Amino acid sequence: MMGEGIRALRRSRHDRVVAGVCGGLGRFFGINPWWFRLAFLIALIPGGVPGVGAYLLAWIIIPKERR
């Protein structure tokens, strides 16, 4: 059928620390969300703005997972 195998990027309701962004990215790309958390932490090092800005943007853009 059409539509099978299509994955939607959604913020996770279960694998979350703050807003579920990294959990959703991990599920979408099929890797451990820990790697995305590490990437956002590294992006915080040069003054915080790149990491926080990217995370907030993803939080706003990526819809929450349905129940």
Image: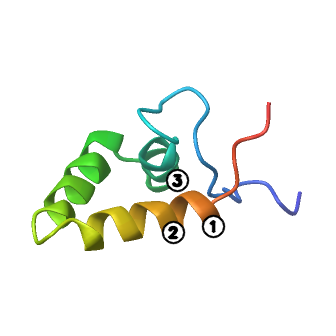
Badges 1 and 3: C-beta atoms under 8 Å apart?
Answer: no
In the image, what residue occupies the spot 27% across and 40% down? 34
**Dividing the image into 4 quarters, which one contains the N terminus?**
bottom right
Q: Name the residue under label 3.
A: 28
Q: Of the residues shown, which amino acid type is indicated by label 2?
A: Leu
The alpha-carbon separation of the residues under discs 3 and 2 comes to 17 Å
Badges 1 and 2: C-beta atoms under 8 Å apart?
Answer: yes
Q: In this image, 42 relative to 64: left or right?
A: left
Work out whether mark 1 precedes mark 3 in sequence or the reverse, and give the earlier one.
3
The reply to whether residue 52 is in sight is yes
Q: Of the residues shown, which amino acid type is indicated by label 1?
A: Ile
The alpha-carbon separation of the residues under discs 1 and 3 comes to 15 Å
> Which one is closest to the eye, mark 1 or mark 3?
1
Q: In this image, 16 relative to 37: left or right?
A: right
In the image, what residue occupies the spot 48% across and 30% down? 15
Q: Mark 1 points at which residue?
A: 61
Work out whether mark 3 precedes mark 2 in sequence or the reverse, and give the earlier one.
3
Of all residues shown, which one is farthest toward the right?
A: 1
In the image, what residue occupies the spot 62% across and 57% down? 9
Q: How many marks?
A: 3
Identify the secondary structure beneath mark 2: helix
* Foreground residue among 12 and 26: 12
Q: In which quarter of the image is residue 6?
A: bottom right
| Numbered tag placed on residue 50 in the rendering | none
Mark 3 surroundings: few (<14), some (14-19) or many (≥20) residues within 10 A: some
Q: Of the residues shown, which amino acid type is indicated by label 3?
A: Phe
Mark 1 surroundings: few (<14), some (14-19) or many (≥20) residues within 10 A: few
User: What percent of the width, then of the height, locates residue 22?
Assistant: 42, 47
Q: Mark 2 points at which residue?
A: 57
Of all residues shown, which one is farthest toward the top?
A: 14
User: What percent of the width, then of the height, locates residue 8?
Assistant: 68, 57
